[in-house]
Amino acid sequence: MIRYKKIRGHKRIWKSIDNWVAQNKQLDLEYLQSRQREYVKIWIQPFGNISILNSEFAPPKGKTRRKLIAGLLEIHKHWKQELDKLNKPYYLKIWFYNNDVSNSQIVCAIDDCLDFYENTFHKSEESKPFPNANFGLEWEYRHNENHFTIDDIGEPDEYYSMKDFLDNKKMIERIMKNPKTRITKHTDESGKKTTYYSIRYSDVWLSSVPS
């Protein structure tokens, strides 16, 4: 069971959110045109810190959550204004994680990378309505998945201990047998066939601007 640590210094966190928005709301079109894709994550301490001793900070709530959502919308608005100046198709979406909004991000792409992110999340036959006010956007429900293959089991000498190897082997084999696991097969250009075992670990909603 994960233990959540108490968050202190809320005023400092709110100031950090304001700074994060100010630093990221201006999209660098020159950089985008050279790289053809760009994103911004929520880099706000203490959210996103690596879990230590089976404890972590709880997802943002209350005013902190509201400020993060407002920040995502503000950056999205400014990026859209810049992308519209290009007069060509573009991908621009907020990837919204309702259970932990600090995992959310804004992503855009153009030209050869226009479809780069289309298969990032699994489009399930299941449908869930967006769990908040729609913020003036349309939202599409997707599954965020972890993907495994039998090669991920590895060999015992790749681990610190035999226990680590056996624990990982047991975990992957359990996923492979789970009736909720989505199984797909892929053949690469060399003819190598790989079976992927994909298991949902969170819900995510993708935004789009109403037409």
Image (cartoon, helix red, strand yellow):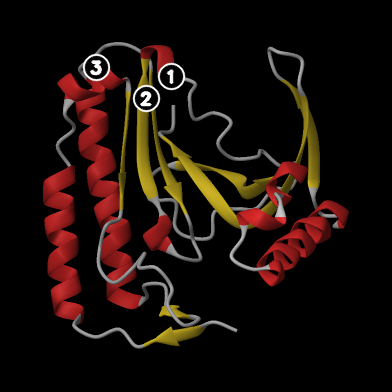
Residue 194: percent from left, percent from top? 77, 31
Q: Is residue 149 visible?
A: no
Q: Which of marks 1 and 3 is in front?
A: 3
Find out whether the residues at labels 2 and 1 contact each other: C-beta distance under 8 Å: yes
Residue 147 vs residue 175: left or right?
left
Q: Is residue 210 left or right of residue 88?
A: right
Sequence order check, earlier mark of 3 and 2: 3
Q: Can residue 91 be seen in this view?
A: yes
State the residue position of label 2: 109
Residue at 25 percent across and 54 percent down: it is 71
Q: In this view, does 135 lie above or below 106?
A: below
Q: Distance between the residues labelled 1 and 3?
A: 13 Å
Amino acid type assigned to the residue bearing label 3 in the image: Ser
Image quadrant in which the N terminus is located: bottom right
Comparing 207 with 172, the one in front is 172
Residue plotted at (75% across, 65% down): 166
Q: What residue type is labelled 2?
A: Ala
Residue 16 falls in image quadrant: bottom left
Tally the numbered discs.
3
Neighbours of disc 1 within 10 Å: few (<14), some (14-19), many (20+): some
